[in-house]
Amino acid sequence: MRFENKVVLVTGGSSGIGRAAAQAFAKEGATVVVAGRGEEQLAETVALIGGGASWVRADVSSDQDVARLVGTVVDRHGGLDVAFNNAGIFAGGTVDGLDPADWERLMAVNVTGVWLSMKHEIAHMRGHGGGVIVNTASNIGAHRRLPGLGAYAASKAAVSALTRAAALDHIGDGIRINAVSPGPADTPMSMRPGETVGERDERMKSASPIGRVASLEEVAAAVLYLASEESGYAVGMDMVLDGGASA
Protein backbone atom coordinates (compact mmCIF):
# COMPACT_ATOMS: atom_id res chain seq x y z
CA MET A 1 0.00 0.00 0.00
CA ARG A 2 2.70 2.47 -1.02
CA PHE A 3 0.12 5.03 -2.19
CA GLU A 4 -2.41 4.89 0.60
CA ASN A 5 -3.97 8.34 1.16
CA LYS A 6 -2.37 9.62 -2.05
CA VAL A 7 -4.20 11.27 -4.94
CA VAL A 8 -2.84 10.17 -8.32
CA LEU A 9 -3.59 11.64 -11.74
CA VAL A 10 -2.97 9.51 -14.84
CA THR A 11 -3.25 11.15 -18.26
CA GLY A 12 -3.73 8.84 -21.21
CA GLY A 13 -5.54 6.57 -18.79
CA SER A 14 -8.13 5.18 -21.18
CA SER A 15 -6.08 2.18 -22.35
CA GLY A 16 -2.70 0.49 -22.49
CA ILE A 17 0.06 1.60 -20.14
CA GLY A 18 -2.05 4.37 -18.62
CA ARG A 19 -4.89 2.01 -17.74
CA ALA A 20 -2.50 -0.60 -16.32
CA ALA A 21 -0.72 2.01 -14.19
CA ALA A 22 -4.02 3.45 -12.95
CA GLN A 23 -5.11 -0.01 -11.83
CA ALA A 24 -1.75 -0.65 -10.17
CA PHE A 25 -1.84 2.66 -8.27
CA ALA A 26 -5.36 1.88 -7.04
CA LYS A 27 -4.35 -1.60 -5.88
CA GLU A 28 -1.71 0.05 -3.71
CA GLY A 29 -4.18 2.36 -2.02
CA ALA A 30 -4.27 5.47 -4.25
CA THR A 31 -7.30 7.53 -5.13
CA VAL A 32 -6.96 7.63 -8.91
CA VAL A 33 -8.24 10.10 -11.49
CA VAL A 34 -7.75 9.14 -15.14
CA ALA A 35 -7.84 11.67 -17.97
CA GLY A 36 -8.07 11.47 -21.75
CA ARG A 37 -10.28 12.32 -24.68
CA GLY A 38 -12.38 9.15 -24.95
CA GLU A 39 -15.13 9.25 -22.36
CA GLU A 40 -16.31 5.67 -22.95
CA GLN A 41 -12.80 4.26 -22.58
CA LEU A 42 -12.13 6.36 -19.47
CA ALA A 43 -15.35 5.07 -17.93
CA GLU A 44 -14.19 1.52 -18.68
CA THR A 45 -10.93 2.16 -16.84
CA VAL A 46 -12.80 3.53 -13.83
CA ALA A 47 -15.13 0.51 -13.84
CA LEU A 48 -12.12 -1.83 -13.83
CA ILE A 49 -10.62 0.03 -10.88
CA GLY A 50 -13.80 0.51 -8.88
CA GLY A 51 -13.78 2.24 -5.51
CA GLY A 52 -13.18 5.97 -5.51
CA ALA A 53 -11.66 6.25 -8.99
CA SER A 54 -13.02 8.85 -11.39
CA TRP A 55 -12.32 10.33 -14.80
CA VAL A 56 -12.05 13.73 -16.46
CA ARG A 57 -12.19 14.39 -20.18
CA ALA A 58 -9.27 16.58 -21.24
CA ASP A 59 -7.02 17.30 -24.22
CA VAL A 60 -3.51 17.71 -22.83
CA SER A 61 -2.51 19.95 -25.74
CA SER A 62 -4.96 22.60 -24.46
CA ASP A 63 -3.76 24.88 -21.68
CA GLN A 64 -7.35 25.56 -20.66
CA ASP A 65 -8.18 21.84 -20.51
CA VAL A 66 -5.13 20.97 -18.43
CA ALA A 67 -5.76 23.82 -15.99
CA ARG A 68 -9.34 22.60 -15.60
CA LEU A 69 -8.15 18.99 -15.20
CA VAL A 70 -5.74 19.72 -12.36
CA GLY A 71 -8.24 22.05 -10.73
CA THR A 72 -10.92 19.36 -10.88
CA VAL A 73 -8.65 16.78 -9.25
CA VAL A 74 -7.80 19.18 -6.43
CA ASP A 75 -11.43 20.20 -5.94
CA ARG A 76 -12.61 16.58 -5.81
CA HIS A 77 -9.93 15.18 -3.54
CA GLY A 78 -8.26 18.09 -1.78
CA GLY A 79 -4.90 17.79 -3.46
CA LEU A 80 -2.61 16.08 -5.96
CA ASP A 81 0.32 13.96 -4.79
CA VAL A 82 1.42 12.02 -7.88
CA ALA A 83 1.00 12.65 -11.61
CA PHE A 84 1.76 10.15 -14.36
CA ASN A 85 1.84 12.12 -17.62
CA ASN A 86 1.32 9.30 -20.07
CA ALA A 87 -0.84 10.80 -22.82
CA GLY A 88 0.83 10.47 -26.20
CA ILE A 89 0.27 9.62 -29.85
CA PHE A 90 2.30 7.92 -32.57
CA ALA A 91 3.00 8.93 -36.15
CA GLY A 92 5.43 7.42 -38.63
CA GLY A 93 6.98 8.81 -41.78
CA THR A 94 10.32 9.89 -43.16
CA VAL A 95 11.51 13.41 -42.43
CA ASP A 96 10.73 14.55 -45.98
CA GLY A 97 7.44 12.68 -46.22
CA LEU A 98 5.66 13.55 -42.99
CA ASP A 99 2.57 15.70 -43.35
CA PRO A 100 2.92 19.04 -41.50
CA ALA A 101 -0.40 18.49 -39.75
CA ASP A 102 0.87 15.15 -38.37
CA TRP A 103 4.06 16.81 -37.15
CA GLU A 104 2.14 19.60 -35.42
CA ARG A 105 -0.30 17.23 -33.73
CA LEU A 106 2.53 14.94 -32.61
CA MET A 107 4.40 17.82 -31.01
CA ALA A 108 1.22 19.31 -29.55
CA VAL A 109 0.31 16.12 -27.68
CA ASN A 110 3.67 14.51 -26.94
CA VAL A 111 5.69 17.61 -26.07
CA THR A 112 3.35 20.51 -25.34
CA GLY A 113 1.01 18.11 -23.53
CA VAL A 114 3.75 17.02 -21.14
CA TRP A 115 4.89 20.60 -20.61
CA LEU A 116 1.38 21.88 -19.87
CA SER A 117 0.68 18.95 -17.56
CA MET A 118 3.84 19.59 -15.57
CA LYS A 119 3.21 23.35 -15.55
CA HIS A 120 -0.14 23.02 -13.81
CA GLU A 121 0.79 20.04 -11.63
CA ILE A 122 3.91 21.83 -10.36
CA ALA A 123 1.94 25.02 -9.68
CA HIS A 124 -0.24 23.06 -7.24
CA MET A 125 2.45 20.82 -5.75
CA ARG A 126 4.86 23.68 -5.07
CA GLY A 127 2.45 25.29 -2.65
CA HIS A 128 1.22 22.07 -1.03
CA GLY A 129 4.23 20.18 0.24
CA GLY A 130 5.65 18.84 -3.01
CA GLY A 131 4.86 15.74 -5.00
CA VAL A 132 6.06 13.32 -7.65
CA ILE A 133 5.74 13.43 -11.44
CA VAL A 134 6.53 10.64 -13.90
CA ASN A 135 6.47 11.29 -17.64
CA THR A 136 6.27 8.73 -20.44
CA ALA A 137 9.08 9.15 -22.94
CA SER A 138 10.25 6.24 -25.13
CA ASN A 139 13.32 4.20 -25.97
CA ILE A 140 12.84 5.74 -29.43
CA GLY A 141 14.22 9.24 -29.03
CA ALA A 142 17.08 10.04 -26.71
CA HIS A 143 18.17 6.39 -26.55
CA ARG A 144 17.50 4.89 -29.99
CA ARG A 145 16.42 5.90 -33.48
CA LEU A 146 14.74 3.88 -36.23
CA PRO A 147 14.15 4.71 -39.92
CA GLY A 148 10.81 6.37 -40.57
CA LEU A 149 10.30 7.53 -36.98
CA GLY A 150 12.14 10.84 -36.96
CA ALA A 151 9.25 12.99 -35.78
CA TYR A 152 8.19 10.55 -33.07
CA ALA A 153 11.82 10.23 -31.92
CA ALA A 154 12.16 14.01 -31.79
CA SER A 155 9.00 14.34 -29.70
CA LYS A 156 10.04 11.71 -27.19
CA ALA A 157 13.63 12.96 -26.98
CA ALA A 158 12.09 16.32 -26.09
CA VAL A 159 10.10 14.67 -23.28
CA SER A 160 13.30 13.18 -21.90
CA ALA A 161 15.12 16.53 -22.00
CA LEU A 162 12.13 18.43 -20.61
CA THR A 163 11.82 15.93 -17.76
CA ARG A 164 15.42 16.36 -16.70
CA ALA A 165 15.29 20.14 -16.97
CA ALA A 166 12.11 20.30 -14.90
CA ALA A 167 13.62 17.92 -12.34
CA LEU A 168 16.51 20.33 -11.75
CA ASP A 169 14.20 23.34 -11.68
CA HIS A 170 11.85 21.93 -9.06
CA ILE A 171 13.59 19.46 -6.78
CA GLY A 172 14.14 22.45 -4.49
CA ASP A 173 10.35 22.77 -4.30
CA GLY A 174 10.07 19.20 -3.03
CA ILE A 175 8.89 17.87 -6.42
CA ARG A 176 10.65 14.81 -7.85
CA ILE A 177 10.35 14.44 -11.61
CA ASN A 178 11.46 11.40 -13.63
CA ALA A 179 10.59 9.59 -16.85
CA VAL A 180 10.08 6.04 -18.01
CA SER A 181 11.11 5.09 -21.55
CA PRO A 182 9.42 1.85 -22.62
CA GLY A 183 10.23 -0.11 -25.72
CA PRO A 184 7.55 -2.20 -27.44
CA ALA A 185 4.82 -3.12 -24.95
CA ASP A 186 1.70 -5.23 -25.26
CA THR A 187 -0.38 -2.52 -26.93
CA PRO A 188 -1.57 -1.96 -30.51
CA MET A 189 1.29 0.53 -30.99
CA SER A 190 3.73 -2.40 -30.99
CA MET A 191 2.08 -3.97 -34.05
CA ARG A 192 2.73 -3.14 -37.66
CA PRO A 193 -0.25 -2.33 -39.93
CA GLY A 194 -2.29 -5.49 -40.47
CA GLU A 195 -0.18 -7.53 -38.07
CA THR A 196 -1.78 -9.89 -35.55
CA VAL A 197 -0.64 -10.34 -31.97
CA GLY A 198 0.76 -13.76 -32.85
CA GLU A 199 2.69 -12.36 -35.80
CA ARG A 200 4.08 -9.57 -33.66
CA ASP A 201 5.18 -12.01 -30.98
CA GLU A 202 6.93 -14.16 -33.58
CA ARG A 203 8.70 -11.11 -35.04
CA MET A 204 9.83 -9.96 -31.61
CA LYS A 205 11.66 -13.24 -31.01
CA SER A 206 14.41 -11.95 -33.29
CA ALA A 207 13.70 -8.20 -33.18
CA SER A 208 14.35 -7.79 -29.45
CA PRO A 209 17.28 -9.07 -27.38
CA ILE A 210 14.83 -10.35 -24.77
CA GLY A 211 12.66 -11.89 -27.47
CA ARG A 212 9.30 -10.39 -26.55
CA VAL A 213 7.37 -7.21 -25.82
CA ALA A 214 6.97 -5.87 -22.29
CA SER A 215 3.82 -6.72 -20.40
CA LEU A 216 1.75 -3.77 -19.28
CA GLU A 217 2.28 -4.87 -15.69
CA GLU A 218 6.07 -4.62 -16.11
CA VAL A 219 5.85 -1.04 -17.34
CA ALA A 220 3.36 -0.12 -14.63
CA ALA A 221 5.71 -1.56 -11.99
CA ALA A 222 8.49 0.75 -13.20
CA VAL A 223 6.15 3.75 -13.06
CA LEU A 224 5.07 2.93 -9.53
CA TYR A 225 8.69 2.54 -8.44
CA LEU A 226 9.57 5.99 -9.77
CA ALA A 227 6.46 7.43 -8.09
CA SER A 228 7.15 5.79 -4.73
CA GLU A 229 9.37 6.73 -1.80
CA GLU A 230 11.59 3.76 -2.71
CA SER A 231 13.05 5.89 -5.51
CA GLY A 232 13.47 8.93 -3.29
CA TYR A 233 17.00 9.63 -4.56
CA ALA A 234 16.01 9.44 -8.24
CA VAL A 235 15.81 12.94 -9.71
CA GLY A 236 15.80 13.55 -13.47
CA MET A 237 16.09 9.83 -14.18
CA ASP A 238 14.99 8.42 -17.54
CA MET A 239 14.41 4.71 -16.92
CA VAL A 240 14.77 2.71 -20.12
CA LEU A 241 12.63 -0.43 -20.15
CA ASP A 242 13.11 -2.08 -23.54
CA GLY A 243 14.47 -5.59 -23.10
CA GLY A 244 17.97 -4.58 -24.14
CA ALA A 245 17.09 -2.99 -27.48
CA SER A 246 19.02 0.20 -26.75
CA ALA A 247 21.73 -1.35 -24.58
Image (cartoon, helix red, strand yellow):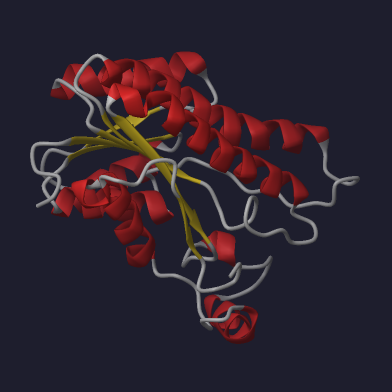
Residue in the image at 51% along x and 67% along y: 242
Q: Nearer the viewer, residue 47 or 78?
A: 78
Q: Give x and y (percent) for residue 233.
A: 30, 46
**Residue 69 shows in this picture:** no
| Residue 17 horizontal side relative to residue 203, left or right | left
Question: Considering the image in quadrants, where does the C terminus appear?
Answer: bottom right
| Residue 243 horizontal side relative to residue 5, left or right | right
Q: Nearer the viewer, residue 229 or 158?
A: 229
Q: Give x and y (percent) for residue 154.
A: 70, 43
* Rendered position, 184 above or below 159: below
* Rendered position, 1 above or below 128: below
Residue in the image at 9% along x and 43% along y: 4
Which quadrant of the view contains residue 9?
A: top left
Q: Nearer the viewer, residue 199 or 117?
A: 117
Residue in the image at 59% along x and 33% along y: 111
Farthest residue toward the right?
96
Q: Give x and y (percent) for residue 121.
A: 35, 23
* Rendered position, 125 above or below 204: above
| Residue 116 horizontal side relative to residue 9, left or right | right
**Residue 190 shows in this picture:** yes
Which quadrant of the view contains residue 75?
A: top left
| Residue 104 horizontal side relative to residue 226, left or right | right
Residue in the image at 68% along x and 47% along y: 152
Q: Give x and y (percent) for residue 172.
A: 33, 24
Q: Nearer the viewer, residue 208 or 96?
A: 208
